[in-house]
Image (cartoon, rainbow, N blue to C red):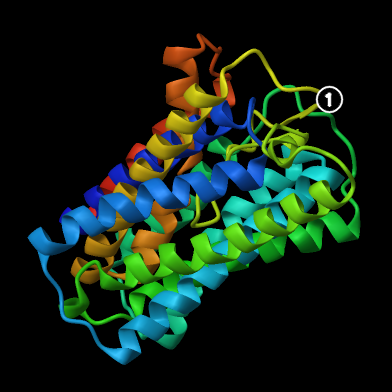
Amino acid sequence: MVSALLALVGAVVYGSADFLGGLAARRLRSIVVTAISAIGGITALLLALPILGGVWSVEDVMWGALAGIFGVIALALLYACLAIGPMSILSPLTAVVSAIAPMLWGLLVSGETLAPIGYAGLGVALVAVVLVGFIPGGAVVRPSLRGILMAIGAGLAIGGFLIVIDQTSPESGLGPLVVSRAVNLVITSIIIMTMVFVAVHRGRAAASVLDASGWAVGATPTGHADLEHAVQVDAPAAMTRTRAWWLAILCGVLDAAANALMLVALRLGDLSIVAALTALYPAGTILLAAVVLRERVAVVQWAGLSLALVAGGMLALA
């Protein structure tokens, strides 16, 4: 029961981080938001590390590094999805795959077994994932095979992050998450520095690579993204760069908190259950958008949120 509750709370926190990342991306480029959020996240994890403790081992460090690579792959594929669309189809597909992959791993590879109500709960959770991830007003356009494959790839990468983190030892504490965030920060920093070099070489200001361009979508280092509010922009929105930085940092802190909740949930319960509930991360984005931006929550999304609570209760009894 505790594991399911932590996973459900973690999903809401993940979605909240995505929402803040989405706001920051109205002013800063998506990859910059991701790098800044990685800085905020690793800082929070390092501050918590001495308090929570943990034993470092080569194996756990390797698992953490691999998790960081999965996060970067997920981000790359999510951004690619935005360029193809339609998000009304590809966004729920990404979320569903991110749930199914670790669910199957837990049930078929790790040998997890659930009570009958648990298996029913997994089914209810998958339906909830589709409904919660629904994007109101999305154009009804048949997605291309390339878009579908990228969405599936993004979901597999997010699911891979969960599977890999689940391999770490309980004694490692937050260590694997620190390593994962560090790897993500290094990779995104290299990308940004390359962009700066190219900009300067072409006679543009180095700071020009920071501003929002293309698809304005904030993302977290673990591969989640605010896809519902993804819009194509031609110029930065009316937001100061300083405020955008702070939003991105807070995005990273919340993402790190969600990671910690997910990690504890994995160590207390089953991967299949945690994966199904973690995939409900768009719920946090929806709720914050309703409160902060006064956005209307679609009926289908309310149905998804209700089913998410039902699924959480069923899986808690599994």
Few, some or many residues within 10 Å of mark 1 (<14, 14–19, 20+) = few
Residue 149 figure quarter: bottom right
Q: Is residue 199 above or below residue 105?
A: above
Q: In this rendered view, identify the residue nearer to me: 97 or 216.
A: 216
Q: Secondary structure at mark 1?
A: loop
**In the displayed structure, does residue 280 sit left or right of residue 91?**
left
Q: Is residue 246 above or below residue 80?
A: above
Q: Position of residue 303 (x, y in %)?
A: 49, 29
Q: At x 18% / y 62%, what residue is drawn?
A: 49
Q: Position of residue 209 (x, y in %)?
A: 73, 41
Residue 26 figure quarter: top right
| Residue at the farthest top position | 294
Q: Amino acid at mark 1?
A: Asp
Residue 25 figure quarter: top right
Residue under pointer 1:
234
Q: Position of residue 267 (x, y in %)?
A: 22, 70
